[in-house]
Image (cartoon, rainbow, N blue to C red):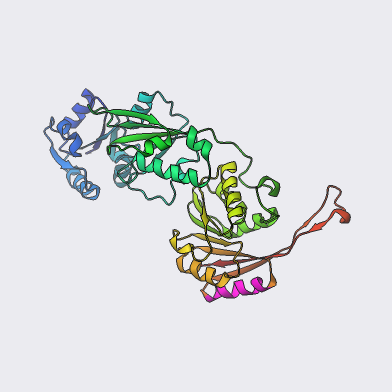
């Protein structure tokens, strides 16, 4: 039976065993970078890009004999290996890996990587770079032209300055291994600010080392007294739990927290769903300052504070998967209209209503836009240690209105 021989090229090229395997292949699929290695064999050479056409060529030639595929390093690590195994099945693919660029980069800087998180930005889009890079103390990044080390560092710098995370900005270090194994190889180390001011060739590996994260119990259960807020303006613990349950947050995507106040819902949501990008919209500067402090304190760097009045600032945000309206400033109709117009398929809008007027208005507005509406009334009583009526505290009733697409 014919096989696909997937060969990973190391810094020193390919081994004798890999060359022997390659010589038996009817065709060789590779990029321009590795064509000189493929040229030693008798097989026909086909470009690995576009990948879709390369896969079709492999399928057509497999009936006549073995096919060789040359790729960099370990092809099963963010490489073509995944596509080949998915399309042709594991029994059809033999893998002869080389040393990956990740291993080389860490070896050059003498950085252990068994405790690192690995992220590929190749051909990806990101609403917020902090979601991927700031939630672990050591992150190894595969970059591309859209996410070059200087651009990534610039985005990190801008965000960390926004949330006043000076310690992380100053103490973090970025290592860039550029053009590994080539004559023009370059190794660069510096602060986030320094790397942001440089330029780099396309072939590189970036490593971000940041101060160790503070570990908090969780992911759900922060208390009001732990969260910085002003004059009691915070979603109460019990209401926050109900609200998060009703939101049914996805693990990834975009969440708008409108009228964020202290950012308590944003912070708890961020801890529950580290892959979710959260926009905490607030118009009052004092409350925005509290949001920033809470982001840094709880290291919820997937939360982005947005200064401004809703719905005016909502048009510039990425389309949401979930929307929470904790405060509307008398503009609930306009906010629901803006949110409903941008909400992605399968999304939800949750409105917490303190007043009877808002409790009646919210369901009608959501129904007007075609949402299935659910209404819950939350009444909370807190008791002292003795559970006596004398120590009982009754909090305001909250009506939680959910609109489901």
User: Magenta: predominant secondary structure element?
Assistant: helix
Residue 173 percent across, percent down from the top left: 44, 32
Q: Give the range drawn in magenta.
A: 357-368
From the viewer's side, name the closer residue of 110 and 196: 196
Above or below 352: residue 11: above
Residue 110 percent across, percent down from the top left: 40, 23
Residue 306 percent across, percent down from the top left: 51, 55
Q: Residue at x 59, y 45 (%)?
A: 293
The answer to whether 99 appears left or right of 402 in the picture is left
Q: Number of labelled discs? A: 0
Residue 120 visible, this orientation:
no
Above or below 395: residue 211: above
- Outermost residue toward the front? 285
From the viewer's side, name the closer residue of 328 and 62: 328
Above or below 157: residue 212: above
Residue 5 within the magenta-colored segment of the rendering:
no
From the viewer's side, name the closer residue of 277 and 376: 277
Q: Which residue is drawn at 85% across and 53% down?
A: 391
Above or below 404: residue 187: above
Residue 183 percent across, percent down from the top left: 22, 26
Q: Quadrant of residue 5?
A: top left
Q: Which residue is drawn at 30% across and 30% down?
A: 97
The answer to whether 377 appears left or right of 159 in the picture is right
Residue 155 visible, this orientation:
yes
Q: Quadrant of the N terminus?
A: top left
């Amino acid at each position: 039976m014919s096989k696909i021989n997937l060969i990973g090229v190391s810094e020193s090229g390919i081994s004798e065993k890999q060359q022997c395997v390659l010589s038996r292949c009817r065709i060789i699929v590779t990029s321009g970078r590795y064509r000189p290695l493929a040229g030693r064999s008798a097989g026909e050479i086909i470009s690995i890009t576009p990948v879709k056409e390369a896969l079709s060529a492999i399928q057509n030639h497999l009936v006549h004999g073995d096919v060789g595929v040359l790729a960099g390093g370990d092809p099963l690590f963010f490489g073509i290996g995944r596509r080949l195994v998915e399309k042709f099945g594991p029994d059809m693919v033999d893998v002869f890996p080389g040393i990956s660029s990740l291993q080389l980069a860490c070896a050059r800087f003498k950085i252990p990587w068994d405790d690192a998180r690995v992220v590929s930005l190749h051909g990806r889009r990101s609403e917020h770079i902090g979601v991927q890079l700031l939630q672990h103390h050591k992150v190894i990044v595969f970059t591309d032209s859209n996410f070059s080390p200087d651009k990534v560092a610039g985005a990190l710098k801008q965000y960390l300055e926004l949330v006043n995370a000076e310690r992380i900005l100053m103490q973090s270090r970025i290592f860039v291994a550029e053009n590994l194994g080539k004559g023009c190889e370059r190794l660069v180390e510096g602060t986030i600010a320094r790397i942001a001011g440089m330029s780099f060739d396309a072939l590189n590996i970036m490593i971000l080392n940041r101060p160790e994260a503070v570990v908090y119990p969780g992911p759900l259960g922060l208390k009001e007294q732990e969260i910085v807020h002003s004059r009691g303006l915070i979603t109460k613990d019990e209401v926050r739990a109900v609200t998060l349950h009703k939101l049914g947050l996805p693990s990834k995507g975009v969440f708008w927290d409108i009228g964020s106040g202290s950012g308590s819902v944003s912070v708890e949501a961020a801890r529950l769903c580290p892959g979710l990008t959260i926009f905490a919209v607030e118009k009052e500067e004092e409350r925005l300052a509290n949001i920033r402090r809470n982001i840094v304190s709880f290291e919820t760097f997937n939360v982005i504070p947005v200064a401004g009045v809703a719905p005016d600032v909502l048009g510039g945000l990425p389309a949401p998967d979930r929307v929470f309206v904790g405060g509307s400033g008398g503009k609930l109709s306009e906010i629901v209209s803006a949110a409903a117009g941008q909400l992605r398929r399968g999304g939800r809008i949750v409105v917490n209503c303190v007043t009877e007027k808002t409790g009646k208005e919210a369901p009608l507005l959501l129904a007007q836009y075609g949402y299935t509406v659910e209404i819950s009334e939350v009444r909370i009583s807190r008791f002292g240690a003795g559970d006596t009526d004398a120590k009982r505290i009754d909090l305001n009733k909250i009506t939680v209105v959910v609109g489901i697409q």
